[in-house]
Amino acid sequence: MDDALDGLSGFGDFILLDSLRMIMENKSMRYEYIHMDDVPLREKLRDIDEMVKYAESNELYEECTVLIDMKNQIIENNK
């Protein structure tokens, strides 16, 4: 993931990379994000889609897998 630092093109990329790091390092944060009610479903899915796009463009495939799993859990919890 540190190689992705080379591709940072701005503050938005820094935020995405920092969010990815926190998600990958802290499983309890993943759980909390999936189950929190403070953030609307649409916003959660948009955020994850942005992180997936960033991870794909930087070839962070393990991160993509975790994010897609989170997205599926969010959708399942909101049925």
Image: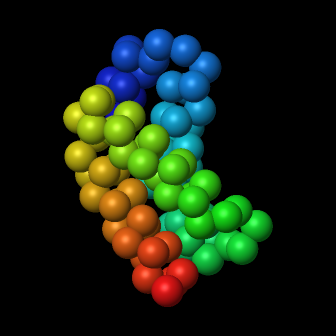
Q: Residue at x 61, y 55 (%)?
A: 43
Q: Is residue 29 left or right of residue 73?
A: right
Furthest toward the right, the residue is: 38
Residue 28 seen from this side: no
Q: Nearer the viewer, residue 51 or 3?
A: 51
Q: Which quadrant of the figure contains the N terminus?
A: top left
Q: In the rendered view, how is the structure colored? A: rainbow
Q: Residue at x 49, y 73 (%)?
A: 74
- Give coordinates of residue 29: x percent, y percent: 60, 64
- Give coordinates of residue 28: x percent, y percent: 58, 70
Q: Residue at x 61, y 77 (%)?
A: 35
Residue 40 seen from this side: yes
- Give coordinates of residue 67: x percent, y percent: 39, 57
- Give coordinates of residue 8: x percent, y percent: 45, 17
Q: Please determine whether, in this image, residue 51 is positioned above or below residue 30.
A: above
Q: Nearer the viewer, residue 21 or 59?
A: 59
